[in-house]
Image (tube, helix red, strand yellow):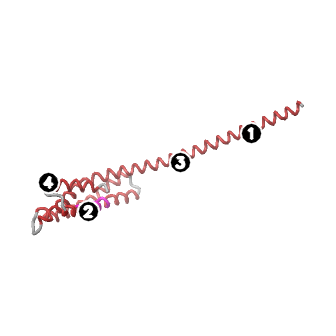
């Protein structure tokens, strides 16, 4: 989800630099780009989650994921970029018609790949810390309710003791009154 705006940056820059307008073929390139970019982010986050389930810290999981998944992500992006390069340059019959699509995909892939390897780990870390704070908040809330309950129970016991004292003193007064009579 957060990787798509990163890809759009590259699409816009690529089309501006190449001089192509955003038409239907460029839009088809964006559709192709969405699948590739989301796949890269899913591969990254999935592996980080696997490491987290193996009790790795967020930082260690992100570093290991970056080291392990960098190569497949780069290879996917490079093969697509190199495959679309002849189309973007305009080599072949009908290439000028499909060149905006290739330029959109190449520009989007370059920006999203580079920015995904920086932005996604940062966002993952933020979300993980927020979920940690949520857990701490739940624990604190539970502890507060336990303490409140204990205090209420103590207050009830204290009120009960005071009521018993009042009853005893009233009974003593009644006994004294009867003795005086």
Relative to the observer, which residue lies in front, 52 or 37? 37
Q: Residues within 10 Å of mark 3 (few under 14, many from 20)?
A: few
Q: CA distance from mark 2 to mark 1?
A: 76 Å
- Which label's residue is closer to the chain start, 4 or 1? 4
Q: What segment is highlighted magenta in the picture?
A: 30-42
**Of helix, strand and loop, which one carries label 3?**
helix
Local secondary structure at mark 1: helix
Crowding at dot 2, Cα within 10 Å, few <14 / some 14-19 / many 20+, comes out as many
**Residue bearing the label numbered 4:** 17
Per the model, the C-alpha gap separating discs 4 and 1 is 89 Å
Question: Which of the labelled discs sits on residue 36, or is there none?
Answer: 2
* Label 2 or label 4, whichever comes before in sequence order: 4
Q: Would residue 98 be found to the left or right of residue 160 on screen?
A: left
Q: Nearer the viewer, mark 4 or mark 1?
A: 4
Point out which mark residue 142 bears: 3
Q: How far apart are the alpha carbons under marks 2 and 3?
A: 44 Å
* Mark pair 2, 4: CA separation: 22 Å
Q: Is residue 164 left or right of residue 73?
A: right
Q: Which mark is residue 164?
A: 1
Q: Secondary structure at mark 2?
A: helix
- Badge 4 marks a residue whose secondary structure is helix
- Cβ–Cβ under 8 Å for marks 2 and 3: no
- Name the residue at 43% across, 49% down: 132
Q: Quadrant of the N terminus?
A: bottom left
């Amino acid at each position: 989800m957060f990787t798509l705006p990163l890809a759009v940056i590259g699409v816009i820059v690529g089309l501006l630099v190449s001089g192509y307008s955003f038409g239907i073929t460029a839009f088809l390139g964006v559709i192709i780009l969405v699948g590739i970019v989301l796949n890269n982010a899913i591969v990254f986050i999935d592996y980080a989650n696997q490491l987290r389930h193996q009790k790795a810290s967020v930082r260690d999981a992100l570093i290991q994921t970056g080291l392990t998944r960098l190569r497949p992500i780069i290879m996917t992006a490079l093969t697509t970029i190199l495959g679309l390069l002849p189309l973007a340059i305009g080599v072949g019959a009908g290439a000028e018609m499909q060149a905006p699509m290739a330029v959109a995909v190449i520009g989007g892939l370059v920006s999203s790949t580079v920015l995904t390897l920086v932005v996604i780990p940062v966002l993952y870390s933020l979300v993980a810390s927020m979920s940690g704070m949520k857990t701490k908040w739940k624990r604190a809330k539970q502890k507060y309710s336990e303490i409140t309950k204990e205090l209420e129970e103590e207050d009830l016991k204290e009120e009960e003791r005071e009521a018993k004292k009042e009853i005893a003193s009233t009974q003593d007064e009644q006994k004294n009154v009867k003795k005086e009579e």
